[in-house]
Amino acid sequence: MDADDSRAPKGSLRKFLEHLSGAGKAIGVLTSGGDAQGMNAAVRAVVRMGIYVGAKVYFIYEGYQGMVDGGSNIAEADWESVSSILQVGGTIIGSARCQAFRTREGRLKAACNLLQRGITNLCVIGGDGSLTGANLFRKEWSGLLEELARNGQIDKEAVQKYAYLNVVGMVGSIDNDFCGTDMTIGTDSALHRIIEVVDAIMTTAQSHQRTFVLEVMGRHCGYLALVSALACGADWVFLPESPPEEGWEEQMCVKLSENRARKKRLNIIIVAEGAIDTQNKPITSEKIKELVVTQLGYDTRVTILGHVQRGGTPSAFDRILASRMGVEAVIALLEATPDTPACVVSLNGNHAVRLPLMECVQMTQDVQKAMDERRFQDAVRLRGRSFAGNLNTYKRLAIKLPDDQIPKTNCNVAVINVGAPAAGMNAAVRSAVRVGIADGHRMLAIYDGFDGFAKGQIKEIGWTDVGGWTGQGGSILGTKRVLPGKYLEEIATQMRTHSINALLIIGGFETCDRIKQSASGTKRRVFIIETMGGYCGYLANMGGLAAGADAAYIFEEPFDIRDLQSNVEHLTEKMKTTIQRGLVLRNESCSENYTTDFIYQLYSEEGKGVFDCRKNVLGHMQQGGAPSPFDRNFGTKISARAMEWITAKLKEARGRGKKFTTDDSICVLGISKRNVIFQPVAELKKQTDFEHRIPKEQWWLKLRPLMKILAKYKASYDVSDSGQLEHVQPWSV
């Protein structure tokens, strides 16, 4: 059931929470199993949201082991306990395997330790094993209490007072191996680590002709291997859910030798650590190296990433995902009744959902059963639509069919980049070119945007021409902000000259960590950061949520001098505690008069004697650098979808002679709630504020209250919010 189906409150989030008081309740939070980046963000959100609603929140250190051992392993948390942990990897409260909790005697001790502190609400952050253990604990709870009463460890009043245990889970796993959620906490950060290594390896291609075999984590799930292969354009990938067909050894060697014949200097093969063949026999990285060296004689190196994938700073996505899940988990605990089954907070498309815990665990176990029984198609299906979509896209882009096997459409499809350069543009162009060629079209590249279009800077582009484009930043085709208005006649002429049947436009509508690390060593300092975005405050708002900012000023939410004064007072009060650092973000066009300099000077003057200020304008560095795994993957898949749509439209028009454009032949492709949809431009006009170049409705505004709650604003705001804490899920396309 969707979260909005089950709650659907009206008004501000604060008003919604008024009837969900946590007074008199105690919440225990623990992390269990393997650590994952973003766990600290989830812990922080549970603690602060719990305190916000009036509950007591307890850290349970070292997972279930700490629950069994009790004593100082269970300690009350306060607001400052989770300060400055958003950017820290791993888990500050520790995680450990616990054999004792697998026994009833161990669970009896754990129950006794929880009751000593009145804890009857449990938030568990871990994998399916950890969540299964929590569910068993919940089912046994009443029996454990009765046994403790018989042993004289608690009285009968305690049995009645603490009669039932509420359990809510969040999945922390870099493997993304839990069914029921599109993304688990830590997966996106692990992908960042993998792509960083691949990008580093890519540089050696300038010096040597080599084949690299990269082994990534995933004993039972190939998600990391699959998405990283898609995001870096790997030549071959091995997954446990989809073993290669018989004779793969020869096919792979042929592919690698063809690459070498085309003067490609680097081959990359990605292997999930649990990769198997169709007989369920392991395919190891060493076996692959031996095959390449023996059959082809290529210089081949093996890189095993191991626990590097668990390390480092969590990505912005993982911080936001974990923060939202932590808040949702507390709300779920407050709403729980004795009849509410243990649930897991999951992500489905754009929606936060609560699903029955054991149903998800059963689905996860069904995947492994399907693989054990060699029902690999079922295994891929059970992994979900996102996994299957990733696999199909990779297959289409990785291997080119011989020309004589591709039926020609006699259609010319052109690709152009427009607007400001954006990370992921090159991945999108690569995807469009290869899918278009696979569909039988002749692909044309237009250089330097509409300016180049008008001047005839157009040439055919082939399959190998876009090799290695996935990880490149900026726009290889070149892009300009020039609009087509004054060039329409010239562009029309070029379209006739080159017989262009369809045009794919990739472009626009026409980082705080290091700063915060610097602040960590500084006493009583507030940083004012200006982000890009025109009139759209998305970067400022989401950056603020990911970095734990105290305020984010945006155009969509008008503010005045009273709001600025309130924020200064909030920071002044905050500096009197052990928290002595502040972070404020400002969208570049949020106000004509309240400029970054004005806000900096105001904060500096009003905070005199309490804190000092520093400012930083991020500028165009936000557009630079290599694209993230999300941008590579999203650009690749959404562009493939666009080409499939173009092919379908061209087929509809075939044999009809001239066909004049209709509203549904000019569309924009993007994510809307849970779905990837093609929206006619004519319809989008109704939904767009053209003066400010932003949508009239912005989904992410619903996250504004969340940032304020976690920054310890006690009230004094009223942001319209449906209660549905939405977030765009990058890998579900």
Image (cartoon, grey):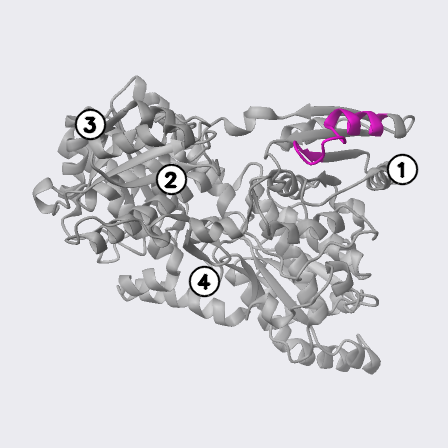
Question: What is the CA distance from the residue labelled 3 to the residue labelled 2?
Answer: 24 Å
Labels 1 and 4: the sequence-earlier one: 4
Q: Looking at the picture, which amino acid does disc 1 mark?
A: Lys
Q: Is residue 311 visible?
A: yes
Which residue is the site of mark 3?
298
Q: Which mark is residue 576?
A: 1
Q: Residue at x 35, y 67 (%)?
A: 369
Which residue is the site of mark 2?
231
CB under 8 Å between discs 4 and 3? no
Q: Looking at the picture, which amino acid does disc 4 mark?
A: Cys
CB under 8 Å between discs 2 and 1? no
Labels 4 and 3: the sequence-earlier one: 4
CB under 8 Å between discs 1 and 3? no
Q: Is residue 596 magenta?
A: yes
Q: Looking at the picture, which amino acid does disc 3 mark?
A: Tyr
Tell me if 293 is positioned left or right of 688 in this view.
Answer: left
Question: What is the CA distance from the residue labelled 2 to the residue labelled 4?
Answer: 22 Å
CB under 8 Å between discs 3 and 2? no
The residue sitting at the front extreme is 489
The residue sitting at the right extreme is 609
From the viewer's perspective, is residue 414 above or below residue 177? Answer: above
Labels 2 and 4: the sequence-earlier one: 4
Residue range highlighted in magenta: 585-604
CB under 8 Å between discs 1 and 4? no
Q: Secondary structure at mark 3?
A: loop
Q: Secondary structure at mark 1?
A: loop
Q: Looking at the picture, which amino acid does disc 2 mark?
A: Ala
Question: What is the CA distance from the residue labelled 2 to the residue labelled 1?
Answer: 46 Å
Tell me if 100 is positioned left or right of 20 in this view.
Answer: left
Measuring from the top left, give residue 321's x and y in whole percent.
58, 51
The residue carrying pointer 1 sits among few (fewer than 14), some (14 to 19) or many (20 or more) residues within 10 Å by Cα, namely: few
